[in-house]
Image: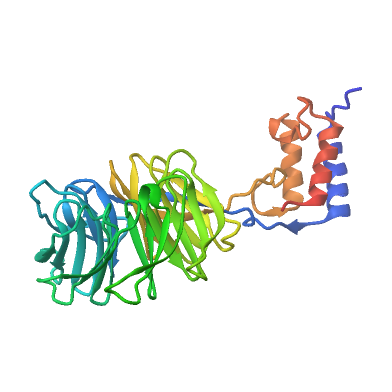
Amino acid sequence: MNLNFTNTALVGRAMIALTLGLVGTHTYAQNTNCELIPVEQGLIDTIGSAQKVDFVGTTMFVADAFGGLQTIDVSDPSNPVYLGSAVVVGDAGIYASDVTVSGNRAYVTDWFSGLLIFDVSNVMNPSLIGVFSSLSGPNSVVVEGTIAYIADGLEGLKIVDVSVPFSPQLIGEYNTPGNAEDVAIEGSTAFIADGINGGLQIIDVSNLNTPTLLSEYARPNNTFAVDVFGDVAFLADGATGLSAFDVSDPSDPILLDVVPVTSSAVWDVVIDGSNAYIAENLTGMRMIDISDPSNMSEVASYDSAGTCRGIARSGFSTYLCDSEEGVVVLDMVMDCSIDCSIDLNGDGRLNFFDVSTFIQLYEDQSPAVDMNHDGRWNFFDVSVFLDLFAMGCP
């Protein structure tokens, strides 16, 4: 038997009595099912291919593979403004791979020229003031005080005194077994992402002249970058993904967890608070919750146009180095939309007005009130509506 209600007034009286008399009026929480969504906030197409970035205040410094050092004003992240550049071409060409800024000096590693030291007191016109060329193919640099730690590819870790910037001096080195891609310094310990065959290398640099190996942890694929937060080292573990290690005892690192790649290889990682932001080569940006490093999980992701080599955080924005687009500025937007099928007027409350709307839609035989999805408008739809109304929305 098909119990179609054709008497709208009867339906209305029955529903109002049942709904308001038995259930009443109440609100529901509209903003409980929230999701972080990365959206493009700004974009600047650099001269060459953006590799890595660093920040001083609202100035972004870009190591641009074929364009050298670029300076960008990001005081308004939605509208980055090009400021200046400095290009040094070595005998075999140019390939700026990394940049770090300390004081009014920018330190740029270049595969063909070595370590380049720029005076950036005038960000619109950086000037070269020093070069350390005795490097094999440097990939990254970290500066602590007057000491530069360089991941020098096939020659491992190089330690350079830059106290006199126009005459930098090598003071220590450690030849790692792989291809040193990145270095992070925590106290007197250096952590090296050692590329193919090298895994994670942990080196004691308390004596700068004679760094010594503390431990190593082999990995099955290339390792490209490392960042350390407290007692945990986060490794951009290439085709494996993002790996977290307990390094509270640097002589005995313990693998805690791995977040697998989605399609290609993780090339860079930066930690900000309880999240890791990773650049996955052919995918883009992935945001990982690391509040429990032994149980990491993805929070959000952003698909980029090209290949991604580097990633950084400044303020509330994420900066993704994309080979095709340059530097993409991402903002994290909270989407708190919630699906409450019986809040028919969308005001965040379940009350008489939803009943009234139901009656009107019922009379019009709208699909919105075919509550049991059987293609009919009858008592069963009324029953489902009342049951859902009684339960409320999340």
Q: Position of residue 304 (x, y in %)?
A: 38, 42
Q: Which residue occupies 52% across, 65% down? A: 252
- Which residue is farthest right? 1
Q: Position of residue 254 (x, y in %)?
A: 55, 61
Taking depth in this image into account, of 37 and 247 the one nearest to the observer is 247
Q: Which residue occupies 88% across, 27% down? A: 3
Q: Position of residue 157 (x, y in %)?
A: 29, 62
- Quarter of the image for residue 348 reads bottom right
Q: From the viewer's perspective, is residue 4 above or below residue 168?
A: above
Taking 168 as reference, is 1 left or right?
right
Q: From the viewer's perspective, is residue 295 above or below residue 18?
A: below
Taking depth in this image into account, of 219 and 148 the one nearest to the observer is 219
Taking 172 as reference, is 246 left or right?
right
Taking depth in this image into account, of 224 and 192 the one nearest to the observer is 192
Q: From the viewer's perspective, is residue 392 above or below residue 324?
A: below
Q: Position of residue 10 (x, y in %)?
A: 87, 37
Q: Is residue 302 visible?
A: yes
Q: Is residue 267 visible?
A: no
The N terminus: image quadrant: top right
Q: From the viewer's perspective, is residue 336 above or below residue 315?
A: above
Taking depth in this image into account, of 277 and 370 the one nearest to the observer is 277
Q: How is the image coloured?
A: rainbow
